[in-house]
Image (cartoon, rainbow, N blue to C red):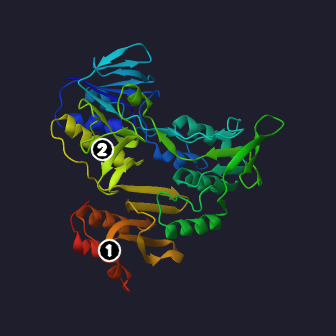
Amino acid sequence: MPVVIIGGGQAGLQVADSLRGGGYTGTVTIVADEPGLPYQRPPLSKDYLAAGADPAPLPLRAASFFPEKDIALHDGVSAVSVDRAARTVALSDGSILLYEHLVFATGAANRFLGCDGAELPGVHGLKTLADAEALHAALPAARDVVVVGAGFIGLEFAAAARARGCSVTVLEFAARPMGRALSPAMSDWFTAAHAELGVRLQLGEGIAHFEAGPDGRVMAAVSTTGARYPADLVVAGVGVVPNDSLAAAAGLETANGIVVDEALRTADPAVLAVGDCASFPSVHAGARNRLESVQNATDQGRHAAQTILGAPSAYTELPWFWSTQGSLRLQIAGLSTPGDTTVINGDPAAGKFSILCFRDGRLAAVESVNSPGDHLGARKLLAAGRGPSPEEAAAPGFSLKAYARQAAPSPV
């Protein structure tokens, strides 16, 4: 009963690992389009870009993992087609793999800028090890950096470039940074925090086009307001799109990702999807959702393995995220919405606080800055379906960490 996993990222590796951990004895094969060992992606926009850092990849599993677990890794090749009737996957090297179960763990790809000059030398994306290596090599000579997009990746890179002494401008078409992930109050706090770091954050201002210099490389960015910003290095961080075209070509339903049920199965019970490419019914969002996080990739990988092992159940794991932007450590538990009521706990002026988000009087999410104790407490509470009322959280002397210890003492 062979299992084929398309994708060598966090989700795909976890499926394989959990299958073996669960006693699966059939053939397990991972198809990874990047050459070499699968690696961790979060450090690419942070640690790898620091002065003196070595952008060597941190492997998700040691090289010995694959032979020890009897997992076949086909690296540097891609899946080009899936025949669901024959239950086969055709690879770019001409080989054909048979499967009893197929798992799409294809992740997501950077959304490309569609403006003039986006292909100029000096305009970069940041998703892969090759991207990080190119930026690591370019940063020492960079003077004027423009970042397009004030999401996690854009602001992580902006902080890293500013720490390297670059002049940094961030163009964000939306009215606030990280608007899809954060409450308005936390977005406002990060706007001020990046300004203190010396990052120029231009909100409500997108990119119109780039200008080339005499050498053919990018020289300036022109925004949607007509403003012109010098730029010898540009990073585009305008979000990602799910890699779901292979699944769509195989006749599977896609809608901002590969559509799966609560057990992460597609309409074809032999085919599953996990991680950044999967659109699943989320009990925390109250709607179908697609999440881009290490936690979701790892937890869905474990869950898909259980489905393959014959114990399907509803995926209900609490979503949580993090982002390190210079000295600012942001951690989020749960999913907030713009209409949530918020209560601030801690001292924003000291850079150590949390924002509790309430929906219909119940705790729905907690955003924490440099407060790991609050974050862990929030995860315990939200996973247990517990939490303070807005009035309790707003009371003088309230401590989220202490409340969680008393109300939900079990470990995460």
Nearer the observer: mark 2 or 1; the answer is: 1
Tell which of 285 and 366 is nearer to you. Answer: 285
Q: Is residue 265 left or right of residue 237?
A: left
Image vertical order of residue 349 relative to residue 321, above or below: below
Label count reads 2
Give the residue drawn at x 24%, y 65%: 385
Instruction: Determine which quarter of the picture holds residue 219.
Output: top right
Question: With respect to residue 218, does 174 lie above or below?
Answer: below
Kindly identify which residue carries mark 1. 361
Q: In what quadrant of the picture does the N terminus appear?
A: top left
Q: Residues within 10 Å of mark 1 (few under 14, many from 20)?
A: some
Tell me which amino acid carries mark 2: Gln
Up-down: is 255 above or below 226? Answer: above
* Three-letter amino acid code of the residue under disc 1: Gly
* x and y, in percent, of residue 69 in the image: 25, 30
Say whether disc 2 or disc 1 marks the residue closer to the N-terminus.
2
**Quadrant in the picture for residue 79:** top left
Quick check: 137 left or right of 185? right
Residue at image location 40% in from the left, 49% down from the top: 293
Of all residues, the one furthest to the top in this rendering is: 94
**Which residue is disc 2 drawn over?**
300
